[in-house]
Image (cartoon, rainbow, N blue to C red):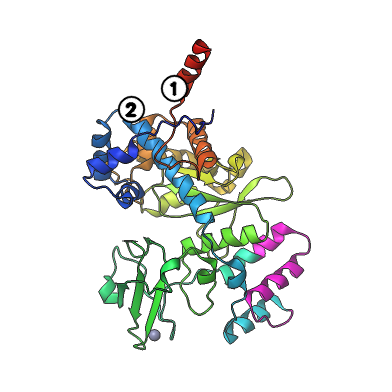
Amino acid sequence: MFCSTTALSALHVKDATLSALHVNDATALERTFAHLTAPALETLEMGLGGRTPDTARTIGRALLRRKVHAVLDKSNDFGDVEAGLDIALPEAMRSRCLKQYGGLSPTTWRDCLSRLKTLSGDSREQLWSYVIAHPMTEYVPNQCQRCGHIVPDETTPGYTDAEVGISEVPPTASERPFVRGGYYRGARSAVAFLLRCPECGDESRWFRSSDAQVILNPNRWGRLCGEQEDLRAALARHLSVPLRAILPLDWDHVWSETRREADGAWVACQGPGDAPAANFAGRLDEGIGAWTRVIAVSADVEGTSDVTEEYLSCCSAGGRADERLDEEMPRYRETVSAARADASGSATQAKTLNGHVLHRAGFGREEVTCILRQAVVDHGVVGWWEWQEEEEEEEEEEEERGGG
Ligand SMILES: [Zn+2]
């Protein structure tokens, strides 16, 4: 079922995208797929020869592969967790942790972790629930690092960068290796932000990063949802806790699942400040648009799959959601179906069309899972925009048999 990499026939997604966009840099390709709006999709389709089910299958496969490779790329990029654990804690954080967890006053995050290990005995599951509730992994809004004035996060409706006192600035030489692009009050490339605090007048710098050493900064450093997830993934690996990334399509969010010790089943991780994870279906009622699918990505092939059905079912039916959502599920399924069918992108929270493309491609749960798993296998070997078509593989086998 999986591709051999020797006889790779690169699909022409990359070339087609770049020529349709009249550019030749890979960031344009990345940008097009990262925010697959109706105009972006049309551009892709034109480059690939028009709006057909075949084109949808090509684009659908590429967008799923991109999601997988992005998660796996990141997991190679968590930086120096050990150094992060050795960062000295400010006095306020020490007393807060001491008060909450007892033991000796911690001087570093490593001390905190060792206290949590003591409290959880032999249970890795218990340890993990402590870690995701601990100040070391908590959500911290971007704020003035002197007085704690919080920068408003909302842009629609909300304030411009200038109105809240921030501006994009180039990273310094020492910041550059740690800075990543990402969503913060809008889509951003790898920039730093300078805040001139409207309260105290002081200046703070901040940037998005996947590096544990940066994210573990305990001095009023912003740790948003994406940073929390990256840090959890880094710490899970450090502690040998099984963890997989959960990504909804067409909705800007990410969370994770771990294995329950009793039966090995995957369960949604739920930290105290997290948006409801197991009841993600319920978020369809927030009035901000729909999601269209949910996928699980892990470096382990078996842990990678389409988990939409799990998030549209209650526990008693093998799903994730609380029973109280049981009556709502048929309506949630309809909402998701309608969002998949919508070609404008206006039905989804992210205003993108990933689920719509998969719908047009006719991909079911099993096909999506197969594509995702293939991308895990060939990560680091071929790009997400290239793969070998199965039909060609079969033909080659035919030829080999005929010729031999
Ligand atoms: Zn301030």
Q: Main secondary structure of the magenta part?
A: helix
Residue 60's place in the image compared with 398, above or below, is below
Which quarter of the rendered picture does the N terminus lie within? top right
Whether residue 233 is in magenta: the answer is no
Q: How busy is the neighbourhood of tag 1: few (under 14 within 10 Å), some, or many (20 plus)? A: few
Amino acid of disc 2: Pro
Task: For mark 2, give the secondary structure.
Answer: helix
Q: Which mark is residue 53?
A: 2
Image coordinates of residue 271 in percent, x first then y, are: 58, 62
Work out whether 173 lies above or below 397.
below
Is residue 343 in sight in this rendering? Answer: no
Mark 1 residue element? helix
Up the image or down, 243 lies above or below 200; here it is above
Give the residue at x 54% y 77%: 218
Q: CA distance from mark 1 to mark 2?
A: 16 Å
Q: Label 1 belongs to which residue?
A: 391
Residue furthest to the right in view is 122
In the foreground, 302 or 143? 302
Residue 324 x, y percent position in the rendering: 56, 48
Q: Earlier in the sequence, mark 1 or mark 2?
A: 2
Q: Which contiguous range is marked in magenta?
A: 103-130
Residue 399, how many percent across, how many down? 47, 15
When asked about the image quadrant of residue 170, the answer is bottom left
Mark closer to the observer (1, 2)? 1
